[in-house]
Image: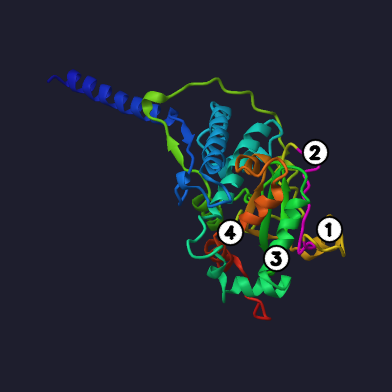
Amino acid sequence: MSGLGLRLAASTSRAARVASRSCRIQSRALHKRKELSYPVEEGLGSFLPPQALKMVAVDYQQGLLDRLNDQVRGTNLENKSIVQTIIDAARDPNKVLEFNYASEALNNSFFLESLKPPPANASSHEAAIQGQNLNRRIKYEYGSLAQFQSNFSAAVMGMFSTGYVWFVVDQDGQLGIVPTFGTGTLLVRSSKPTRTFLEWQRIVGEPIIPYSEHDVRVAPKRPQPSSSLSDSLPATSSPLSGMETRTPPLDPHTPARSVSFYAKPPGMYDDDEPLNHTVKDAKVVGETLYPLLCVSVHEHAWVSAGYGVWGKEEYMKRFWTVVDWEKVNKLYERVRPVRSDGQ
């Protein structure tokens, strides 16, 4: 082959490699629903029968991710993880839908990850924390596990809007019960990747699956805003370490971006104080919160399970039969501080 032919062949080969790389770069990513560790078709005991679990874990979750995928196509949020999407969208008032879909998908995933089918020979999984530090701490602060459950359920019953109620521990080891409203979340409070940032993505974050090169869709770029809220919002702690109370929660569709706190609220049948008495309790909760479990407070959850539109109380009674206390305890052991009083 002549020298000219060799040069042409080499040039063609380089062009092919560049074109191949360009195609891969343009390939966007698809948020995919994470499979649960338990079979959806068998349900979660009497808490969420098979059809109800399918609605919450498959239909609703997939709908959120499908809408998120459509919303981020052709934008600077394309190819980003769920967690990073929440962080970036929360700083931009023009990314409300992106934030809502991503945050709700993450919250719903964490809710489902905190559960498992009830045991065959017991009414709950509470035996998993007997003798554990978490159980001792619950008894120290609430008197008993039953009283904690009553307090947690009271917070759910007193929540008149949709959202989630969370069981948390703060940086000092203090336990608390915290509601988030709408699509607010406690899971993501940081703009900096950390070990715990990656931990949340591993535990509850949906994986990012690239499209094939034959499925590349080119969408026009949306105009980017000239400014965002990022300049006015300080950085916070890592996602696993929850949130700094001095920083507004990541919820761009609420003007005040505020959240209420419940730390050891009154029990469901306690008449000493009203449920919404939070001034004293808010002082007890620390600045940094580590979520341990949460429950979905959405009407579609209990209506689909057959409890009826006013079935929230029965929904909460059965919720405790499927809480995966072993997993909750493992999360607690990862983040709990060692206190001088041994608690």
SS category of the residue bearing label 3? helix
Q: Is residue 240 above or below residue 310?
A: below
User: What is the CA distance from the residue labelled 1 to the residue labelled 2?
Assistant: 21 Å
Q: Residues within 10 Å of mark 2 (few under 14, many from 20)?
A: few
User: What is the CA distance from the residue labelled 4 to the residue labelled 2?
Assistant: 38 Å
Q: Which residue is mark 2?
A: 255
- Please report contact status of discs 1 and 3: CB closer than 8 Å, yes or no: no
- Three-letter amino acid code at disc 3? Phe
Is 335 on the left-hand or right-hand side of 157? left
The residue mark sitting in front, 1 or 3, is 3
Q: Is residue 20 above or below residue 124?
A: above
The residue mark sitting in front, 4 or 1, is 4
The residue mark sitting in front, 2 or 3, is 3
Q: Nearer the viewer, residue 10 or 95?
A: 95
Predominant secondary structure, magenta span:
loop
Q: Residues within 10 Å of mark 4 (few under 14, many from 20)?
A: many
Residue extent of the magenta highlight: 254-267
User: What is the CA distance from the residue labelled 2 to the residue labelled 3?
Assistant: 32 Å
Q: Which residue is mark 1?
A: 278
SS category of the residue bearing label 4? loop
The mark found on residue 6 in the picture is none
